[in-house]
Image (cartoon, coloured by chain):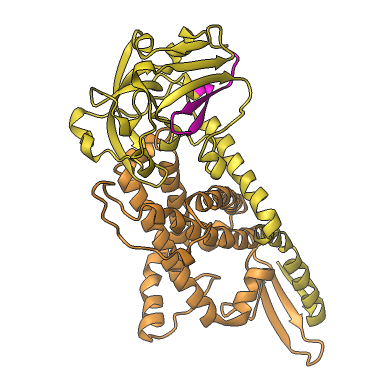
Amino acid sequence: MSTQIAAITNVKTGAIDEAVYEHPFIVRLCHWVNAVALLVLVFSGLQIFRAFPSFGAKIPQKDLLHWPKAYALGGWLGGGLQWHLTFMWIYIGTGLLYLTYEIFSRNYKQVLFMPRDIRGVWPMVHHYFFFGPKPYVREAYNPLQKLAYTSAIVLGILSVLTGLAIWKPVQFSWLVWLMGGFHWARLWHFAVMWAILAFLFGHLVMVVLHGWNNFVSMLTGWKKDPEYL
Amino acid sequence: MNFRTDSRQFKRINRRELLKLSPVLALGAFAVPRLQKPLLKTGLAFSDWASARLFRSGHLARTFDDSELTPFARFPINGYDVDDPGVDFDNWTLTVSGAVQKPGDYTLAQIQTLPKFRQNTRHVCIEGWDVIGRFGGARLADFLQMIGADPTARFITVQCADDYYESLDMATARHPQSLLCYEMYDQPLTREHGAPLRLNIPTKIGYKQAKYLTDLKVSHVLEKAGYWEDQGYSEFYGL
């Protein structure tokens, strides 16, 4: 897929700006629908967790943490499950649409972290966290971004698989077995949620740091004045 | 692919691309109080539909060694099971009705003439905990044959001594591990665990496995889904 680049003449000043079409429509659509679904799943999932906030035996029960009701969706266990079992289909739907689109449009090349990207990770980490020099950027996503987004996609897939194992431990007994048993499947599902939230935190920090043009690109697809042109 | 444009035209392109995302706003329907309930009900119904598709009649729930059993004393009972439902054990019968050839009252002794099966299976509560229990009883499929249940019937509903009620789809009822259970851990059921007769359905979530059975009805349509289903839980909830 060749990237669209636009040269924009400013009608007032006559100056020329450049913009790149970074995010195709399907990607943007999936991004925002998935963002809503993810938040619903997190807060309804925490409601479900509140019913048995442990990963061990029922008797004796040792609670891991008491999640406050005010930060949980659905009002009670049944309500939380209704939200969770409704939005999981939206989450799975956008996930499948996104993955299918990425593969067939070959847009995955923009996102997928490949072995050749390994070398570029440390310089980016050095730049972001230790004030090192800014590495030269040639693509829409730098190696660290690719690593983060690829991890997020993997975590998304894992959240679905661990969820299926808890929801249907008999029909998907092989998934339960892969995860080390039913208790472990619940724990993995919980851990994957926190990992996704960790990604989300970093993601939002980066969105703030990278400014308006970068944010707008996920709404309109077009990024003005990209640094890599 | 490059092209030239001016800033006014580019704004128009951007606006058009932004508007293409407007379908996302449809999710806002979930925030409308009047729409929320029916939407979530539809979502749950879709999940139930998918659950029924995922159910495989020939697929057995995993069984466990005796060494993996949760000790009987640590097999949880619900708070309301502590209240005695007041079953008269001497005169107890299971009243069978609906689409059957032989309706009427069945004694425990009659049910116990059917082949007895014992299984160590996982009992999963909707809250998230699970235990491995040992259950014994007659296959529900055998009992359905005994009472001459209509093979085209689609549901079973049960009524319990403590006003609890539940339902099962016929495919699950005929599953070889679905038991009319009168023993746990090789002993007759205790009162807390649903004496004299309860359901043990390893392919279903815990709340579908009703205790203190008094009535069993075979039907073509689902009249009552269940006590918890009426509060908003899933109707099918197969594991």
Where's residue B5, x and y in %?
A: 79, 77
Residue at (39%, 71%) from the top-left corner? A121
The tint chain A carries is: orange
User: Is B157 within the magenta?
Assistant: yes
Read off the magenta span. Answer: B152-171
The tint chain B carries is: yellow
Residue at (26%, 51%) from the top-left corner? A61
Depth check: give the residue in front, A222 or B186. Answer: B186
Q: Is residue A112 visible?
A: no
Residue A193 sits above or below residue A210 on the image: above
Residue A3 sits above or below residue A212 on the image: above
Q: Is residue B126 visible?
A: yes
User: Is A223 within the magenta?
Assistant: no
Q: Quadrant of the N terminus of chain A?
A: bottom right
Give the left or right position of residue A140, taking residue A51 as reference: right
Depth check: give the residue in front, A27 or B59. Answer: B59
Residue B193 sits above or below residue B16 on the image: above
Where's residue A49, x and y in %?
A: 40, 55
Residue at (77%, 76%) from the top-left corner? B10
